[in-house]
Amino acid sequence: MKSLFPLCALFALATLPQWACAHAEHDKPRYVAENGEDKGRCDKPSAPCKTIGYAAQQASKGDNILVAAGSYAIEDVNTLFYLISNVVPVKGGYSTKQYKRDTNQNPTRLVGVPPEYANELAEKGFTIIVDRKGMDEATSMQLSTKMDAVEEMRRKQLNVNCTNGVAGQFACSNIDLIAHVPLNELGGNTQGNDIWGHYDLNDGREYALMGLRNGTAVVDITTPDDPQVISRIPGQDTTWRDIKVLQQFSASEGVWKSYAYVTADNASVGLQIIDLNELPVRATLASTDTTDISAHNIYLSNVDYSTGVPLPGLQPFLHLAGSNRNGGSFNTFALTNPIDPEPVYRNASNARANYSHDVASMAVFDERKDSQCTNASDYCEILFDFNENDVRLWDKTNNQAPIELSRTSYPLASYVHSGWWSEDKLVMSVHDELDEQSYGINTTLRFFDISDFTQPVLLSTYTGPTRAIDHNGFVRGNRYYMSNYERGLTVLDISNPVTPTDAGFFDTYPVSNLPAFNGAWGTYPFLPSGLILVSDINSGLYVVRDNTLTVAQGSLSFSATEYRTDEGSTLTVTVSRIQGTSGAISVGYETRTGSADSADFAMTSGRLTWADGESESKSFSIAINNDAFDNETHELLFVRLFDPQGGATLISPSMASVVINGTASPGNIGFTTTAITLTEDMPQGEVVLKRAGGNEGSVSVELVLNDAASQAITLEPTTLTWGDQESGNKAVTVTRRSGTSNNRSVSLNLAGDHLGTNTQVSVTLEGASGNEPTRNASGGGGGAAGLLLMLALTGLLWHRSRKAPGTAERGSE
């Protein structure tokens, strides 16, 4: 077989990054033939597999299955599911040697297809024989049951409790389904990928941000059993996206400003920065940074993952992993301007050996910063670099010059994928994405003792009840929330990380529990409400309730979601132990800055303890400072519970807000934009108004048109009112009147007692927009480079990159 080197040369000539050749393990064909054998990876035309089901299990995300001429019996629901779902696209009509497609010359017959799917599969190039003879009653019933499960995955569902091991068609334990938003409601029949959450500090609303093959969906889940899809930000078609959120207070505007950062792998779109500041009306694309045109993972260090707010005294940084530059090693950006990231570090080497698949980080304040870190001062920033073959720990306190502290691997390492850290910062989790496939083992998650950053030690291994692959995971309290592909969401009790145990699960993919890349891609467990988000590749967004937190040792929470206090006072914050008193327990607490900083209050942290059988509430105090500023508006800080010990769990509210009372202010109302355009073919638009700088009392504004404007446009509504303590955004629909002339502008104005700086919007009226139909963003270009790219891509269909002895194949996410 020919080497891939000439193809890589073509890629380089076509201006693609050299690293793209290393990505060839994905977005490639898997071959099936009637005389094939179900062994190996099915990735060579000369060694095809025999069945579609087996080939699908070998496929990575973005792969497709090419089926050669012959007859194939549909005897199990998994095969049928792969055929109809496009999870792994399956096409027939190929020749048996060269795999050239001609459906007339190479008839590919599917025998035993249920009648309702005959037309759909015929359109994919198959010859259909609707014949169920020979299928016994038990098999037929099993097929019907599993097809019912497939239909459930496509249907919106609300408030389905987990009872006797099921929530509707979904197997479960200790997890209730609050809402399921299927893919077709998120933005078309597409595929899902990453998930992150957003808690808007302006109005307390919660959102899910879910990656899709064709973009990013923003869903309002403030009323969790009535989720509302707000926006979909289009993006280049790709299997992989990753999402994080930053939120910071703008003192000049008196509001919290939020942005989502979205990367795409195997793409050329760059880093998308999404403006979340007009929610709940809409989200829009603020900017695109093309310093790196693709990246597998994005990570924000030094932020609180419930709020997206920078940690006290620390600067937030954006890290890209698995990008198209410098061999895919992680690189770092400052976020001084959140919509224009500034590069501060890039590995000097282009070596593929430095490729980072995923990264995470934590700030350490204990003695390890002095004994084990190199750049530390009052703290040490540790970066976890999941590097395919090992885990590398870095001291990144000086983000311009990180220093490697250690490299660690383990037995049966196949693809070191991702991980997280415990809230006591002494344990690291490690996900391996290919060990279940490579070694035929059940779900395997490893935990490492990181009391010594220079020499992590394998502490324990969790083995799951199925062969489903573990993908990504996060810690909140003593629960580990893991996206477990075909098993869905798995929740572990890591009270004792030496013996992690199953606490609950919710199977978002009820068809099977195989080691394949279907089902739950990601999860997000950090919402202040305590709700858990799950993204499923095949079926969309799930909002679930964690019932694993009811334990004999009890649950811990603040006595309120919000506390109010005055300058110069001492605030007492109360923590309750409920639903159990077995055993001695403790929990950490700490303050975190918001619009109030360390000059406004005394930073406070410590631990609260309860004896066995003790149920009384405990409390701690926060000293609020007097400052020299008069007429300050209310200021905000946060208190947080973390690291429960002794088996007790954290329940909501485990994060609470503290408002330092200031001068009562009604705030002001203004537009978020100064201009919009309405065309003949797009005659309707929206303008958004924001209340900022205060929310005391009720405030109303009127939208006013002069005579010329009133003849050109209409408004709905014409008056907006914010109630007492109500903040946030509201929308007005602007509609162009039929027959209005083009190429002119009219003005929309605000009138009222409490107006901000933006009180006028210019509405431009133009002819037809002339927009061409949106093309697939991954479409190729023209010219010589485009031709070479086509040749290279064509060649990749017939060749497989050779792997150096002892190296692992690259994982799927």
Image (tube, rainbow, N blue to C red):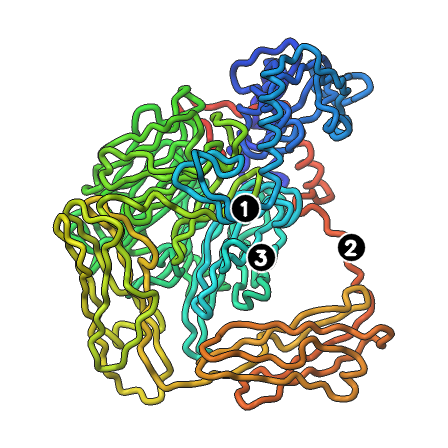
Amino acid type shown at disc 2: Glu
Whichever of labels 3 and 2 marks the residue nearer the N terminus, that label is 3
Q: Is residue 290 left or right of residue 354?
A: right
- Residue 246 figure quarter: bottom left
Residue 647 shows in this picture: yes
Disc 1, disc 3: CB below 8 Å? no
Disc on res. 772: 2
| Residue positioned most to the right | 739
State the residue at coordinates (45%, 74%).
255
Whichever of labels 2 and 1 marks the residue nearer the N terminus, that label is 1
Amino acid type shown at disc 3: Gln
Rendered view: 625 above or below 288: below
Q: What is the CA distance from the residue labelled 2 to the residue labelled 1?
A: 34 Å
Amino acid type shown at disc 1: His
Which residue is label 1 attached to? Answer: 180
Which residue is label 3 attached to? Answer: 228
State the residue at coordinates (59%, 62%).
284
Residue 295 shows in this picture: no
Circle 3: element type: strand
The 10 Å Cα crowd at callout 1, few under 14, some 14 to 19, many 20 or more, is: many
Q: Give percent across and percent down for residue 409.
A: 30, 31
Q: Is residue 258 left or right of residue 66?
A: left
